[in-house]
Image: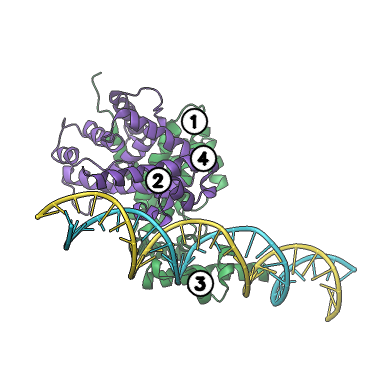
Chain colours: A green, B purple, C cyan, D yellow
Amino acid sequence: MGLRERKKQATRRALQEAGIRLTLERGLENVTVEEIALEADVSTRTFFNYFATKEEALLGDVPATPDEQVRQAFVDGGPTGDFVEDLITVLITFLVSTEDLATQRADMLLRKKLTEREPQLVRGLLARFHNVEVELAGAIAERTGAGPDDDRPQLLAAAGMAVMRHTMKRLHYSESEEPADVRAKIREALRHLGEAFAPPARED
Amino acid sequence: MGLRERKKQATRRALQEAGIRLTLERGLENVTVEEIALEADVSTRTFFNYFATKEEALLGDVPATPDEQVRQAFVDGGPTGDFVEDLITVLITFLVSTEDLATQRADMLLRKKLTEREPQLVRGLLARFHNVEVELAGAIAERTGAGPDDDRPQLLAAAGMAVMRHTMKRLHYSESEEPADVRAKIREALRHLGEAFAPPARED
DNA sequence: CCAATCCTTGCGGACCGTGCAATATTTCTC
DNA sequence: GAGAAATATTGCACGGTCCGCAAGGATTGG
């Protein structure tokens, strides 16, 4: 990676960190883009070369872009063949990025504090989740071979994302949470949903 | 209702209609608040007395505020005693407001066109759904007597709202859709979720 | 008809976000 | 290493959103 690329990454992180720090200190309304840029030693104009909006700088990169390999494996009916288990695999890749665990947990904590202090930020997060949901629905449709008129994949994707959001909220990333634990938590949630909504031997 | 109140309602509607019409004609980016206000014969400043943002004027009032009576009945274990059926009852009140059906369908159609032409508007809608979701989670927690540490109500609420959003998308409000049909559609979706996620006689 | 109340409006201003052209920095080529 | 090409940063100007404030109008109630 050349010097140029490294500098860009550094600037990007500096802007994000400055934005997050200032927002936690004073609240989103009391922080201007100008101040964030100043703090990161770049011009205001440069800020907008990196982020389209002030919010975007704060939200980071979650949920992670779906991994293409994982997606393809899922579409092809893998990795286990069991729909629920494979769905969980995909969901996990959404919330576990390629970075190292320590950084990821730190980010998670920061974002938690941020959204608690500034609930408006939840809007942006929800929008991102929605984008991922659309992707997921497409993958499910491909895997199951559902036709374009069949909207059940969308339903399953919506429910799956709901479970994922729920699980994210439950994660206390300050303590150690191994991927296996995450999988178990998602599995438990899906199971609970199934039990709550499954038709209990209906007499119809 | 006095003259003052009637005028306010009229202005509010005029602003909404002007905003929607202009947006459908030219796209959200090519419509300024100034133009909307002009069209409704008020000043720009007055627009912001009615709506905090340009988006807000377009989104209308959906999802409807949860009906307090329905909520209380649900919390008390009613109206039927069956959790799923009662949940459906609550969900329906979210998407069926107190207005007459004709107006409601017209609004629905307009909003559908709007969000298709301007996907950015979906952000705002999602945020509103999220607020309702929080309310619903509270109601479920009260009904089931779940403790504050029990987050299953939140999970059920999230899944319930996912089903409701999904059902809204499926509704073609141009043709007649009786409330009973809506109920059946939601029931079917919940059932499908249950079957997809229910543990199929696991051997553990 | 007068006073209280509420709404509208204009004005000034802070801030966000963008297009453009100039300048600076890195990278490539020889 | 020098110059050219590619890319990043920056300043500037501008349109637009949204808000606080204070003045003027309309509606209401007595």
Chain for numbered disc 1 = A
Using a 10 Å C-alpha cutoff, classify the residue at mark 1 as few (fewer than 14 neighbours), some (14 to 19) or many (20 or more).
Answer: few
- In the image: residue B198, left or right of residue A136: left
Residue under label 1, please give it.
A144
Query: What is the number of the mark on residue A109?
Result: none
Cα separation between marks 4 and 3: 33 Å
The disc, 4 or 2, on the residue closer to the chain's N-terminal end is 2
CB within 8 Å, label 4 to label 2: no
Amino acid under label 2?
A: Leu
The lab-note entry on whether marks 4 and 3 share a chain reads no
Cα separation between marks 4 and 2: 19 Å
Query: What is the number of the mark on residue B117?
Result: 4
Viewer-proximal residue, A67 or B35? B35
Residue B8: x %, y % from top left? 30, 47
Amino acid under label 3?
A: Glu
The lab-note entry on whether marks 3 and 1 share a chain reads yes
Residue A17: x %, y % from top left? 47, 70
Residue under label 3, please give it.
A34
- Residue at position x 35%, y 58% in the image: A119
- In the image: residue B200, left or right of residue B79: right
Q: Secondary structure at mark 1?
A: helix
Chain for numbered disc 3 = A
Query: What is the number of the mark on residue B15?
Result: 2
